[in-house]
Image (cartoon, rainbow, N blue to C red):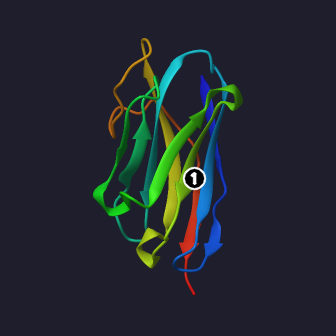
Amino acid sequence: QLQLVESGGGLVQPGGSLTLSCTASGSTSGYYAITWFRQAPGKEREGVSCISSGDSRTRYVDSVKGRFTISRDSAENTVYLQMNSLKSEDTAVYYCAANRQSGRSTYCGYIGMDYWGKGTLVTVSS
């Protein structure tokens, strides 16, 4: 089992920055692609960004390209989502999720998650 805990959310003004962290514990010795999702009030959950277990592949939804950066610190079992130039439409609960892979892979995506965190709230408002 893998446990995921998100942190770093909060209130930020438009144009500001936040860095979210997703820290894993438990069965961390395996290979996992990590995906960030978000769910805004009254909207469906959407995939925001992901990073493959081999760290060579990252993906971003069009609405955050050029503003968000995903990265991993394997020694800390943590994946980060650096969010810059935040907009009011980025307001949401952000979740990280893990997709277990059989080996080091270049794949990451927005389906087939095996483990989920409980989320952290990001509010972009003046």
Instruction: State the residue lying farthest toward the left.
Output: 62
Image point (55%, 16%), residue name: 30
Identify the secondary structure beneath mark 1: loop
Measuring from the top left, give residue 8's x and y in whole percent. Answer: 67, 57
Image point (45%, 75%), residue name: 87
In-front residue for pair 36/73: 73
Three-letter code, disc 1: Gly
Image point (57%, 53%), residue name: 119
Image point (41%, 74%), residue name: 89
Measuring from the top left, give residue 60's x and y in whole percent. Answer: 35, 49
In the rendered image of this protein, does residue 8 appear above or below residue 5? below
Measuring from the top left, give residue 91's x and y in whole percent. Answer: 49, 70
What residue sits right under mark 1 in the picture?
119
In the rendered image of this protein, does residue 16 appear above or below residue 47? below
Measuring from the top left, give residue 81's x and y in whole percent. Answer: 54, 50
In the rendered image of this protein, does residue 3 appear above or below residue 11? above
Q: Please indicate whether residue 20 sits to the left or right of residue 65 in the image.
A: right
Instruction: State the residue lying farthest toward the top.
Output: 103
In-front residue for pair 2/83: 83
Label 1 Cα crowd, 10 Å radius (few <14 / some 14-19 / many 20+) = many
